Image: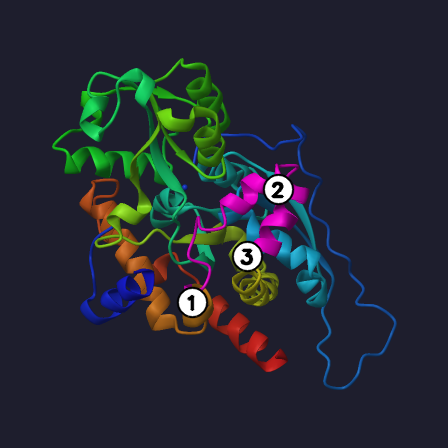
Amino acid sequence: MKKKLLSLALACGMVFSLAACGTPANNESPAPNTESPAIGTETPAADTPTYEPATVRVAYMPNLGSAGSLFVGIEQGYFEEVGLTVETFEFQGGPAEIAAMASGDIDISQIGHGAHKLCIQGEAKIFQMDHTTSLSDVVVGNKAKGIETIEDLKGKTVAVSSGTSSEIILEQALARAGMTMDDINTVEMTVDGMTTAMISGQIDAAASWSPNTVTLQNALGDNYVDLGTNADFLDSAIFPSSYICTPEYAEANHDILVRFAQALDKAHDWRAAHPEEMAKLLAKELDAPEDTMLAAVGEADWQTITEVCGDMDAIKTVYETQQGIFLDNGTITENVPVEDYVLFDVMQEAYDAYSAAK
């Protein structure tokens, strides 16, 4: 289904269509970015690239879709191969990550679909696609609260995390039922907060994402009801995730971005071939239950990015399609050339370097 969607997007120029505020998990300001001025004393082989060592501070969210390629790249040594030391910082959402980059606390962030609108609006540059379609967002209802269908949400209390992909899925699910956000009572919560509130019965429904949805399904049992997911809208939407940085960082650190994206290309291949191993790795790194992470391996299309990697026309079409979602739902009001906020030159150079090193 997902490959069919991408093919349709490429053939027809489809024009339709993840995260809440948070702070670093350790509640400490990241250490200043420092770059080592020396390359090293050993003389490499003539055909081995040499890299000036650099440290990058990277923001992620604690789920497979956001953290998978990052921690695979670290664990497998792919960033080290290109001279990069990666310091990781956990956030609860893309908008908070972008705010941290703007303040200089973070260099690079991984964002879901929802936060891409800020890139379109000029707050950040996309330099690498992470995956073409997220499947992690779910509008979850509690049958014990009298909720069986999306229509049953009328007048109910629904937790949302503004600016996230899950909020967009909620809006689209309501629209298909002839409803709007005005028909429900929304309460702003982090994804962890809404999980706790759902389990304790304080709210009736939540626009959430995995692995929290796995936790909810286990806790609610037969009372868990899926009211809408990304998969329900794949006939008209693509929900990519990306790695981003500020325009200022991009201008000053082109080479670092190319190397980082090159390592991600390699991590994408490993991730697609070893999804369960990735889930186990993330369970260890995020201190999460392994069975929960394993149950979330289907939360994104891991394969397609490995197939379109290096095909800039295909990648451009994905971002154009995504922008169509934002235009259609009124999130943005003017079309912006994707070249204005997507660094295709970085992606191409990274792909060429990765291909040459294979």
The picture places residue 14, in percent across and down from the top left corner, at 20, 61
Observer-nearest of 296 and 353: 296
Q: Quadrant of the C terminus?
A: bottom right
Which residue matches tag 1?
344
Q: In which quarter of the image is the N terminus?
A: bottom left
The single residue placed furthest to the front in the displayed view is 222
Dot 2: few (<14), some (14–19), or many (≥20) neighbours within 10 Å? some
User: Which residue is located at x 38 percent, y 47 percent?
Assistant: 113
Which residue matches tag 3?
275
Figure label count: 3
Which residue matches tag 2?
290
Looking at the rendered structure, the secondary structure element under dot 2 is helix
Q: Does the magenta stretch include residue 300?
A: yes
**In the figure, residue 168 lies in which quadrant?**
top left
Of the numbered discs 1 and 3, the one sitting upstream in the chain is 3
The picture places residue 253, in percent across and down from the top left corner, at 59, 59
User: Which residue is located at x 48 percent, y 25 percent?
Assistant: 219
Q: Is residue 50 left or right of residue 241?
A: right
Observer-nearest of 26 and 219: 219
Q: Is residue 83 left or right of residue 180?
A: right
Mark 1 and mark 3: Cα distance apart in space = 27 Å
Mark 2 and mark 3: Cα distance apart in space = 13 Å
Of the numbered discs 1 and 2, the one sitting upstream in the chain is 2
The residue segment tinted magenta is 275-304
Looking at the rendered structure, the secondary structure element under dot 3 is helix
Observer-nearest of 167 and 213: 213
Amino acid bearing label 2:
Glu
Badge 2 vs badge 3, beta-carbon distance below 8 Å: no
